[in-house]
Image: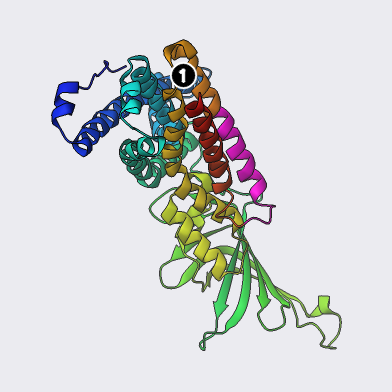
Amino acid sequence: MPDGFAVSHRSLGEASGEESMRIVTRQLTKEILIATAFVMVSLLALFAFFDVAGQSSRIGTRYGIDMALQFAVLNLPRRFYQVMPIAALLGGIYTLSRWAAESQFVVWRISGLSAWRLAQMLLAPASVLIVLTYAVGEWVAPATDRAYTDLRRINVYNTNLKRVYGFKSGVWVKDIVKAKDGSPELLRFVNVGSLSVGEQMETGAWRVFEFSARDNSLLRIIHATNATHVPSRGWHLKNARIETLPAVGRDDGPMIERATIQTAADLVLPSDMQPEILEVLTVKPSAMGIGELHEYIGHLKQMRQETKRYEIEFWNHIVYPILIFVMLMVAMPFAYLNARAGGMAVKIFCGLVIGVVFFGIDNAFTFAGTTSALPAMMIPLVPVVLMLFATSAALWFAERR
């Protein structure tokens, strides 16, 4: 942990009040960032150790220790993103508790430092950590997550197929085929089970159900062993089996006699469905970036499909880094405790318990949010608001002591 810092009363006396606050804010920001970095390195080292230890049964059989270390390293950006609020909380508790133990915080309270002004001072380190967390969560973590998944699939499962996230049978994708005048002509429901790795987007087996946009009658069913995307044309289906159904209501004999079955070694299916949409489906919503979630939500709305699950993740990605400032505010009541109120280890343990309890509540709200009537934007905000109320109550109690 960083060494203690005592503000020079002489230099502060010579400076104006605002200049003194700027000096203290800079020092407070520096110490919180150093303490947070120390906690983060410790947590990441611990997670990396457990990641390597968890692969002990595979080391020497499926891959070597170098591959195990590579898996652990690829996991670190996601771990960094996940534990940053807890690291900020512990770093804030350590710094503010040490200032209180050294009577520095007492001096500033006597000088008129209010809880509101302290919260303003904590905005500086929070802003740095929030920007860093957004950058890692939006660009670094999604890339390393994909690299981790690809490496694991090839080296552990010995396959080059990406399983689509969703159901065991794959994911159902809705596709609308429009006529020349822009009106919907066909409604397609496509079931894709897997994607292959490579420069050319290729999928596993397809099942396609085509409906008329006018009367919702089933027109044909297509089965294909695999498919490849052809830019500006659509999807090239291979070994296709086409079952064409007659129109419902026509009295031309039994429908089963009027149905036809054709086979085609190659069939081009015109479609605006891009490979990027299928690529997104191989990633869990929690591992997507904000941009990817926004793009996929737009696609689902265009296809008139349910979007709440992805909207919750979208807003959770926006709110989650802001939680760092909330956690620093949670650390504020610890500054009002004197040294006799508990040692540093006890305060750090209490902070860790608070962080774990909060994340348990947050995960519970996220899981229950898909079936609740609350707007998607409100679901990640409710635990944060509850934590702010609890922090305000703790500050009120601490100041009245």
User: Of helix, strand and loop, which mostly describes the magenta segment?
Assistant: helix
Residue 98 seen in render: yes
Q: Is residue 68 above or below residue 207?
A: above
Q: Is residue 401 left or right of residue 231?
A: right
Residue shown at the point (47%, 23%) measured from the top left: 51
Q: Residue at x 50, y 65 (%)?
A: 298
> Is 349 one of the magenta-colored residues?
no
Q: Against 357, is 178 above or below?
A: below
Residue 85 coordinates in the image, percent (x, y): 44, 34
Residue 373 sits inside the magenta stretch: yes
On the question of residue 59 being in view, the answer is no
Mark 1, Cα crowd under 10 Å, few <14 / some 14-19 / many 20+, is: many
Type of amino acid under label 1: Ile
| Above or below, comparing residue 332 to residue 287 in the picture | above
Report the span colored magenta: 356-374
- As rendered, which of 119 and 173 lies closer to the eye? 119
Could you say which quadrant of the image residue 76 lies in? top left
Q: Residue at x 19, y 22 (%)?
A: 9
- Quadrant position of residue 64: top left
Residue 19: x percent and y percent?
19, 37
Residue in view at x 42 percent, y 37 percent = 324
**In this picture, residue 128 sits left or right of residue 81:** left
For this rendering, which residue is in front, 165 or 375? 375
- Residue that mark 1 sits on: 348
**Where does residue 11 sit, x and y in percent of width and height?**
14, 25
Tell whether 27 sits left or right of 37: left
Residue 371 in the image: above or below residue 209: above
Depth check, front residue: 162 or 1: 1
| SS category of the residue bearing label 1 | helix
Count of number-bearing discs: 1
Rendering coords of residue 1 (x, y %): 32, 16
